[in-house]
């Protein structure tokens, strides 16, 4: 006698429970993966901007500045958050804090980051042919997970960026 093909109800219920358990485990992991990828994209884009600005300053033997921007054309008013986007421009008059004036070439505009925030201890960044002026700058990239998942771009006085999950002083990052 031939045995019927198929599954019994208990076998199907057990298989469905295993599948549901795996989905329950995978969905949060996948969501974290997406948030990590978005944060990494923003961090890498900012590091690329720092290297580009530093290189342009050397190439032009002048000052190249980065500042937060609301419209992708000019520096925003004081207090504009960096996650609203930023611009890179040739700062001919070398003003500090940097402001893009008429006649100063816009080198690059960066789009806003809607998935998180960027807090910084500098309102603008300016690079000179021999390095960055001023103090060390720290930019913390945060999303809705807070400081435990935050990453920092720390820029030395020479304009060299490095990545960290701590502040320049070694303390925990703060997200605002």
Image (spheres, helix red, strand yellow):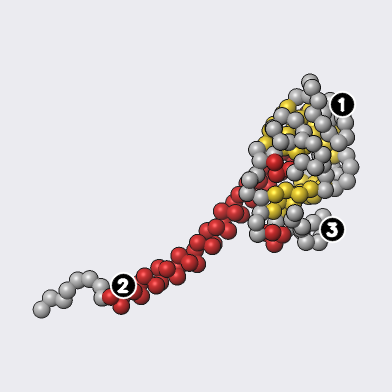
Tell how many labels. 3
**Are the residues tagged 1 and 2 within 8 Å (C-beta)?**
no
The residue beneath circle 3 is 169
Q: Name the foreground residue: 61 vs 87.
A: 87
Residue 170 location in percent, x, y? 81, 60
| Quarter-of-image position of residue 124 | top right
Dot 1 or dot 2, earlier in sequence? 2
Q: Name the foreground residue: 37 vs 176.
A: 176
Secondary-structure class at tag 3: loop
The residue beneath circle 1 is 93
Crowding at dot 1, Cα within 10 Å, few <14 / some 14-19 / many 20+, comes out as: few
Q: Is residue 37 left or right of residue 20?
A: right
Residue 87 location in percent, x, y? 73, 34
Q: Name the foreground residue: 78 vs 89.
A: 78
Secondary-structure class at tag 2: helix
Residue 125 location in percent, x, y? 81, 39
Residue name at image x 82 percent, y 39 percent: 78
Residue 85 location in percent, x, y? 69, 39
- Figure quadrant of the N terminus: bottom left
| Quarter-of-image position of residue 20 | bottom left
Dot 1 or dot 3, earlier in sequence? 1
The residue beneath circle 2 is 12
Q: Is residue 37 left or right of residue 9?
A: right
Does residue 32 appear in the picture of this structure?
A: yes
């Amino acid at each position: 006698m031939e045995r019927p093909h198929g599954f019994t109800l208990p076998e199907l219920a057990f298989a469905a429970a295993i599948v549901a358990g795996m989905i329950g485990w995978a969905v949060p992991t996948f969501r974290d993966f997406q948030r990590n990828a978005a944060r990494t994209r923003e961090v890498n884009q900012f590091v690329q901007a720092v290297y580009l600005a530093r290189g342009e300053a050397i190439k032009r033997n002048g000052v190249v500045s980065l500042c937060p921007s609301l419209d992708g054309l000019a520096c925003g008013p004081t207090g504009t958050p960096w996650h609203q986007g930023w611009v890179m421009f040739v700062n001919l008059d070398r003003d500090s804090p940097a402001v893009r004036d008429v006649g100063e070439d816009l080198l690059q505009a960066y789009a806003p980051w809607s998935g998180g925030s960027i807090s910084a201890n500098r309102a603008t960044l300016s690079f000179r042919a021999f390095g960055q002026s001023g103090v060390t700058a720290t930019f913390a990239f945060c999303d809705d997970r807070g400081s435990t998942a935050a990453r920092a771009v720390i820029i030395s006085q020479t304009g060299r960026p490095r990545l960290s999950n701590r502040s320049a002083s070694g303390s925990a990052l703060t997200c605002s």
